Image (cartoon, coloured by chain):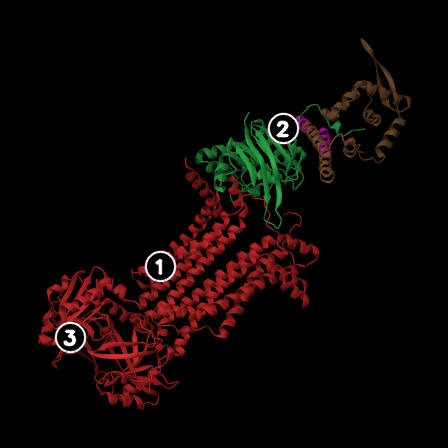
Chain colours: A green, B brown, C red
Amino acid sequence: MSAVLKAVNLVKIYSGGALPVPAVRGVDLEVEEGEFVAVMGPSGSGKSTLVHMLGGLDTRTSGEIWLDGKRVDTLSESAWALLRREKVGFVFQFFNLVANMTVADNVELPALLAGISPKEARERRESLLAALNLGDRADAAPAQLSGGEQQRVALARALANKPSVLLADEPTGNLDSRNTRDVLRLLGEVHKQGQTIVMVTHDARVASLADRLVSLFDGQIVDDGRITRRRTGTAGEVIDLR
Amino acid sequence: MRPHLLALLAKEPAHGYELKQALEQTFGSAYPSPNIGQIYVTLGRLEKDGLVRSVDVEQSNRPNKKVYYLTAKGRDALTAWVEEPTEGPRVRDEFFMKLVLAPLTGIADRMALISRQRRHYLSLMADLNDLLSGTDPRDRVAGLLIEGAMLHLQADLDWLERCQEDLA
Amino acid sequence: MSTGMSTVRAGRRWIAADLRARKGQAVLTVLLVAGIVAALIAAVTLLEDGTNPWRSLFAQTNGAHVWLYTKDRPPDEVGAIDGVTSVAGPYRSAPVTVALGGKKEPAGLRALPSQAPQVARPVVTEGRWLDASQLDGAVVERSFATALRLRPGSSFTVIALSGERHTLYVRGIADSADQGFYPEWTPGLAWVLPPMLDRIEPMLGRSEWVTGLRLSDQEAAQIVSQRVVVMLEDQLQRVYTWREVRAAMELDNRLLGTLLALFGVVGMVAAALALANAAGGRVLGQLRDLATLKSMGFTGGQVTLLLLAEHGALALLGIALGAVTGWAGTVAVLGTTSVAPMPVLAIVGGTALVVLAAVGLPAWRGGRTPPIPDVPAAPPRGHLSRLARLALLVRLPPALVLGTRDAFTRRLPAFLTAFGLAVPMMMITIGLGVWSTLDNFLSHPEQVGQHASLYVRPGKLDSAQAARIAARDPGVRAVYPGTDVNALAPGEARSVRVRALGSTTTPYPFPVVEGRMFARPGEALAGQGLLDLLGVRIGDRVRLTVGGSPLIVRIVGRAVEPDLDGEVLSVGLDSLAAKDAVPPEYYALALRPGADPGEVRARLLAASGESLDVQRVVNPADRLSVIRVVIVALIVVLALIGLANLLTASALGLRDHAFDLAVLKAMGLTPRQVMATLVTGTGLLVVVGVAVGAAAGVSMVTGLIDLQGHTSGVGAGIGRTPSALTMTLAVLVAVGASLAVALIPARRAARAQVPVTSR
């Protein structure tokens, strides 16, 4: 298997303030095709900065980023933007649907951007929303949806172009447990269909969906390994009902 | 397990195997069900203490089976159990002892311990996730039990993070 | 499948959605821009039509650019001069005097065929053109007919040089661009058929020939007229070009141009401001959406283009709508289809450029949004500003202190609020300055060269008699003898006006704004236009030719000169050669304070038995009443823009504020106190904005008007700032209105239930 996404000695130092603040200090990471990687770590450990860099939303200070076998860290901001259209899907904590556009428009926009004909974009949107159980909300404004629904739309939007990698930054950070469960189920399904996912999260339940855990601490990877499943566990291993 | 069996018998008299089935039905796969031997041993003790009585019921072409029912003393004991305040779960955390003591011996470093533990917890969480998705959503008892376990695990993970920030 | 096409498609979707989401605001923006453009076009066209009728007359009559008067019929070579496309005439023309109701007016009778010519064709507005069946019919030029109160069908008497009288009947009244209007341009003009002219003036030697040349390029008029001068030499009586005709017709146009250009600038800045504020506020409000767009794959440049396209399209729509409305309105009012193309194009193009530039900045800002949508805005610095500490020190109530603190902690909204008010306020101040400049024209005409309010020409009397009658009148304070002559400037084919008025010992009080008044013969004052034309400065000597004799003067000062593009040299009568100066052509009468020019004129006419020709000076400000309407309209538009800006800015500020407000309420501030806090915060910015705007306006207004005056030949020195009382009132009204507007969102915010936790 080839690495879809690769980071080599990635460093990010914020030098805006009086003192330069290192956020990411030499991260090496390879994400295989179809892999679901959870990135955890205390706040301030640089996990958001890392995914932002991997998607080109933030510039790296040094190091390399490879996407689909091509080096991309040297790209300009504009070139990154063009690359994102087809290769990177983003899901954010606050959903970030374009407030003025309907749910349908939000989901069709990336497809249109990728040069797909309006007719095909509509078909794609219809099937995506139907799969997410949002078919009847196509003409609603984002503000009319619940948080969970908004995040599902955001997920649909991120997946509209079948990106090489889906980057998610705390996708359930702003949801209650019911909505979290809905989004989790979706992520699991998408992953089962072979979608490569890199996800930053605080939520252990969300992280446990992944098949690999990367722990960041102080801008460095302190642990990187599989999350094994025994499929025999019960609640009794945590709670002893006397 | 004594009060659990008393509670089930308060509903209706039953023999040992019926009690095992009732427990399994209530918790589903979320909780490991007790083996039948354990149940008979407990019933024997309850009978010795005068909390339950048993009668033999004849069965055609099978050995007789013992049907247990609650005595008045048993009902009192059950009432007392329900009414007394319940202690919260007492966490016996072996890992924390390892985390504190192991580095002193030079056998392991804390960061490695924490990382390994975190992955273990996440494996547990992943199992619970699978368990939950395999549980009938209408089975609220099982569902709540799994969610409770998950929340405890989340707390363990958060504690782990605090340990990492402060000890490592 | 190009990335360009796909971006356009996606961008269009976004723009459509954004416009749909804020229909009201978008419509308001379009209407605001349209209103400004329409007002500008209407104002320019109305003023242009009222003050510069030449352009449309010339177009209607297919006029000739160069007119030449010769003793004999000019040779055909005149028509062969380079650049001449067609020739009007030559027509025979005879000088006559029109006698009508005791008045006698000089006129030129011109012989035209019954078939009106193609070039320089008089356009009949009433009655009919000449016809062979009615030999004693005449068509009279409109301004001349108006001066004589002639209507189609009325008759008048012409007296030929021989003294012979003929009666003519008015067949029609026609517009013409052949010469200026009567009585500014004499003699008046009337057309008869050639046989009739032969009958009235049979002597060829007493008539002259008039020829008009139509050119392919109007700018070549100067060169062609020089060729004519060289070709015809002694034959030539005089030659003039369309420029002189236009100048004669437009009169005060220089001054109007000055004010108009100022309005144009004001209007464009207003439009730009409205747009910049609308677009800027919008962009600030949707930074998160823009970041999201970038995370989805829009580049920074594309986001900028997107915003530019959206807001620019609104602006251009507004401009188009405004242009059509302005044009339609003007056509409806004036009833002509001719709208001066140059000013309208300048307005449309200028507004488009200015407005796009204004939108460009917020668009660029939007394009530079970082693509990470969730970066929270940097929290405002919470420390008390110096002003707030001062407020604490003087023990102001807590709401005021908090408001004072708020005013300056959020820099961008603070700047938007203050700036959004300062610019309209500045513009309003400039408008008021123009108003008071006009007032100054009316109340102090002497400061713009109109010390005298009546001009007396001897008419039938002799000059000394006229002076005596004038001096005897109790309303007259001073009588200045004067003569206007044309002089040839060195190297210039056209002549400049030399105005000899008063003497060096008792000089006419010209408004000298630079240098000094002339004190002895041989010294002169010049208008700015003349200084520019000859390329001389105060202190220089110039040599002119008046009727063949040289006139050498030293320019010792500059006077405000609203006439003739400022190309006027003013001297004492004793500086002219006696042949030109004696007797004086006219007398300028300065009246005593309080004397009514109309009454004095009536008395003078009565005293002279209607023999004197007494003319009232037309104050340019009298013709500028249209401008006052425009000023009022502009002030209203500007005030609305300022208030709209304020609303935008304070809404933006409130959105940032909602969280703080909840905290303030939780701390125990009553809604009234919360409102007071908000109003104090806005109020301080309002005061700062209005004060800065007013100060900037006052400091700019004289400079701007004078700059305009300079470039238009009038010269600096006419600008006036609004009076202190006017400014105080304006500032108070502005602050009051702003506070009233600021109260609306503050009230709503103070009453709103804002949950503390949700962000």
Name the image quarter holding residue B26. top right
Q: Secondary structure at mark 1?
A: helix
Q: Which residues are magenta?
A: B129-153
Front-lying residue, B136 or C514: C514
Residue C211, image x, y percentages? 15, 67
Horizontally, residue C52 falls left or right of residue A89, namely left
For marks 2 and 1, give the CA distance: 68 Å
Circle 3 sits on which residue?
C168
**Crowdedness near tag 1: few (<14), some (14–19) or many (≥20) residues, C-alpha within 10 Å:** few
Chain letter behind tag 2:
A
Residue C672, image x, y percentages? 65, 61
Residue B158, image x, y percentages? 71, 37
Above or below, comparing residue C713 to residue C18 in the picture:
below
Q: Which labelled disc corresponds to residue C346?
A: 1
Circle 2 sits on which residue?
A211
Q: Do marks 1 and 3 share a subunit?
A: yes
Q: Do marks 2 and 1 share a subunit?
A: no
